[in-house]
Image (tube, coloured by chain):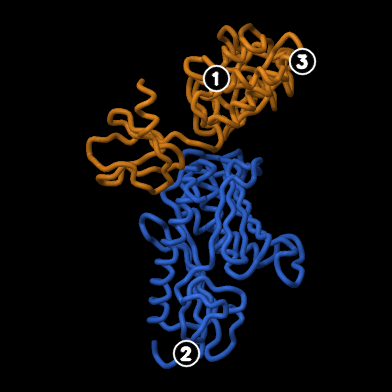
Chain colours: A blue, B orange
Amino acid sequence: MAGKSSYTKRTDGRKFDELRPIDAKIGVIPEADGSAMYKSGNTIAIAAVFGPRTLHPQHMQNPQKGVLRINYDMMSFSVPDRKKPGPNRRSQEISKVTEWALSQCVDLSEFPNTVVDVFITIPQADAGTRVAGINAAVMALAHAGVPMKEMAAAVAVGKMDKTIVVDVCKEEEDYEEGEGATDIPVCYLSRSKKLALLQLDGKIGVDELKEALEMGKIACEKINEIQVKTLKGETK
Amino acid sequence: MNITRTMTERKIVVPGETIIQGEEFLPGDGTRREKEDIVASKYGLADISDKLVRVIPLSGVYSPRRGNSVIGQIIDIKFNGWLVDFNGPTTGFLPVSEYPRYIEQDELQDALNFGDLILAKVNNIKASSVDLSIRLRGFGKLDEGIIMKVNPNKVPRVIGKEGSMVSLIKELTGCNITVGQNGLVWIKGQSIDAELKARKIIEYICENSFIDGLTEKVKSFAETLK
């Protein structure tokens, strides 16, 4: 790292590469074909999967393979200032990027003209909601018995001034000293170790980005371990 | 098949997990080959019998197979047949030619109308629809009794080994029970009480499907219902 960083200690006392305490569960919504809850610190994401089922309107159907449709939504009480209910620019963008990331791991070639609907709900937000949503959605998709090439795990890597940290919380996201805060959500596939999602909000150098991706990869492996344990029923 | 041996070998696998290595193994349902490895493509129980490796799904929607008997509902009438919803990924189609007797073009709704429930056999599976038939004996419209929904992956438990569980429920309640492979169960008995009792027993089986010695448990559970 070039120069000294003003961010020497994390606000919640974690190590720079330490994740927040994670809690995960499957089958939280009995009505859905598959569902999962993923909790990272104070961020909670719930995902429900329906389908494969016939897609309407018909013109949206793909006769070659099934369609994956993601719907991301934050509850109005999930943030300190009430969020107006319903879709907005931000939630639409997150739905779309999640869809692109997860279409890397699901394989719907067996189900033409159908749709797999994933509903991601955030009842409580403390930064990193899109990655929590992805982690929950992956578990829910597996739980729904949807054919998948592999699993995926996501984490938000951040850069506070010149320090790179893993799994940022809201307080860190708002860090303003020095170079300020940069938010980099990444999603890695479990088997091929390919990058499925990479977004960047802020400023970062090439070497720092490489370091951030490497840290993200290790964190994703840790998250994937928890996902697998949850699906296998080995937790608690 | 030696059940006890495979039971101990089965373990839960997640998508992307290597089940077993070796050129000699064959990838079956829910698995694929990646060089040496047999990799799971689905979440479920890995089953290795002889050289065939497959994943038995624990959850998810029903995926139709040829020869399955399913219970479905008429949702649309076309000029040459009926569209049937059977809780699968696509709708089923029942052509007039697969109806047990001859029907005039404009008399389709007299034979089977919107909302009618039928027990049908899966004849053929195409990309966008499933062909059904009710020509065989025992298939056709369901008139009386009650319908209940169970998890399609638990259907083998409800049926039991060679139908042992179904015959046990029949014996305990005196109801006639038909289990559709798609997770719909048709119960027809002498009285509503008997039908409700059968439904409670089936619900009990689904909740406790992983317990050893389920048959005995079901028997004692049926005693408590009296």
Q: At label 3, which amino acid type do we have?
A: Ile
Quarter of the figure that contains the C terminus of chain B: top right
Q: Is residue A18 above or below residue A148?
A: below
How far is the residue under mark 1 from the one under mark 3? 25 Å
Identify the residue at horizontal 54%, vertical 61% (top origin): A22
Residue hosting label 2:
A5
Residue hosting label 1:
B216
Q: Pinpoint residue A91: horizontal percent, then vertical percent.
A: 65, 63
User: Which tag is nearer the camera, tag 2 or tag 1?
Assistant: 1
Q: At label 1, which amino acid type do we have?
A: Glu
Q: State whether discs 2 and 3 lie on one chain.
A: no
Identify the residue at horizontal 41%, vertical 43% (top origin): B13
Q: Chain of mark 2?
A: A
Which residue ends up furthest to the left in the rendered image? Answer: B23
Q: State whether discs 1 and 3 lie on one chain.
A: yes
Q: Secondary structure at mark 2?
A: loop
